[in-house]
Image (spheres, rainbow, N blue to C red):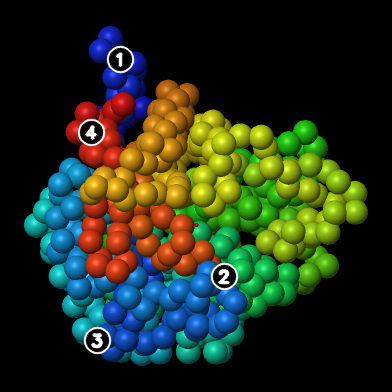
Amino acid sequence: MTMSAEQSYVLEDSGVLRFPEGFVWGAATAAYQIEGAAREDGRGPSIWDTFSRTPGKVHAGHTGDVACDHYHRYPDDVRLMGDLGLHAYRFSISWPRIQPDGTGPANPRGLDFYDRLVDELHGTGVTPIVTLYHWDLPQPLEDRGGWTNRETAERFAEYAAIVHARLGDRVETWTTLNEPWCSAFLGYASGIHAPGRSEPGLGFAATHHLLLGHGLAVKALRAAGAGRIGITLNLAPVLGDDAEAASIVDGLQNRIFLDPVLRGEYPADVVERAGRFTDWSFVEDGDLEIISQPVDLLGVNYYHPQTVAARPGEPANPVYPGSEGIAFPRPDVPRTAMGWPVQPFGLTDLLVRLSRDYPGTPLIITENGAAFDDVLEDGRVHDAGRVSYLDGHLRAAHAAIEAGADLRGYLVWSLLDNFEWAEGYDKRFGVVHVDYATQNRTPKDSALWYRDVVRRNGL
Ligand code: FCB
């Protein structure tokens, strides 16, 4: 992933929109969403095992017990990646497979699985990109307060070191956390995700301990000689005419993570406004130095912008504590099966802004994609809506590169249809269709289209 900004990515005479040489193309997944084998080889329970078993929390009571059975079918799935010509595969490690109690010595059988997976990837010419935490906290740690407890940050760094000790000779790129906003504000402030707690103040405590865990893990990984280290954030441009409303939501969605990691400080306006929910006494001397150690890349997950409007009397949106008086109107644009607006320009805006406001950190899109109501018919899935979504977002990413954004790669979400958290298996994000009754995999039209994009390094 080395290249200079001057390399050519122009619209060539052939009409092909080319990405910079060395641009990394890949796909992403996460452990709990695809692995299954929830009780095998010594894996302990995670907060998602508990949450998905709590009535009313996940669509139709779905769980990740079996999911895509990737734990057993990984050789087939890696073969699929090879067929698509992917350069890289981003997957997450299940912490409760490695430390069933969230602490103490490693469970060797858990590590063995990722060892085999990494070897299989290398054997197929696919570069592994490891995410250490994609939301499946060991339940015993949650029982001691989870991310509201400072100790969880220390446990996370120990776990990171254990995984690196086993895989570090074959894995160069590491990301610590996936989307800490979701862990903190969906998990602890609004109760939409595991562990399902819903107190605004806990959202801020969890944010800080997640970030501290990130910083401690960066230190541990650096000390162990890790190649390239980053963090993945779910970021969204905030649109709307009311500058104050937009700034409040931007603070809670974006700056509360970007500023501590990349500038070593919490945004003053966010700290002040959150004062009704917390006194921030969980921030100890030296924490921000730990949190802001240099990272080698920033992972960006982008799905859609947020549109806001000032509307007096509007109750707070629980995922944004303190957002009273702010409405979230639905822009009149096409939507995905999630109800998310399709607004690719938001990706250009976001990448350009990151390069401007937080210069010097290379960017990689660690997730982008869409759910649609796919139909499998005669062995094909004609997912024109997904192809159009991806095409639009790749054009938007390309425009950002032309405007100077230092974007190094793109990982589509997701390789496979999978357990979409609170939506269960109802929402399909894969470029490859999964028939959950037979576990048959069928590349959708979007997978075949993406294979050509990768082959041409462009559109
Ligand atoms: C992101 C998650 C990922 C997936 C997509 C659709 O927030 O990181 O696991 O669920 O959304």
Q: Which mark is residue 41?
A: 3
Picture layout, residue 305 above or below residue 420: above
Q: How far is disc 2 from disc 1 in space, using C-alphas? A: 44 Å
Kind of residue indicated by mark 3 = Asp
Q: Earlier in the sequence, mark 2 or mark 3?
A: 3
Kind of residue indicated by mark 4 = Asp
Q: Secondary structure at mark 3?
A: loop
Identify the residue under disc 4.
452
Q: Nearer the viewer, mark 3 or mark 4?
A: 4
Q: Is residue 39 left or right of residue 138?
A: left
Circle 3 residues within 10 Å: few <14, some 14–19, many ≥20: some
Task: Give coordinates of residue 117: x percent, y percent.
Answer: 19, 66
Q: Residue furthest front?
A: 378
Task: Give coordinates of residue 5: x percent, y percent.
Answer: 36, 27
Task: Give coordinates of residue 271: x percent, y percent.
Answer: 74, 60
Q: Residue furthest left?
A: 123
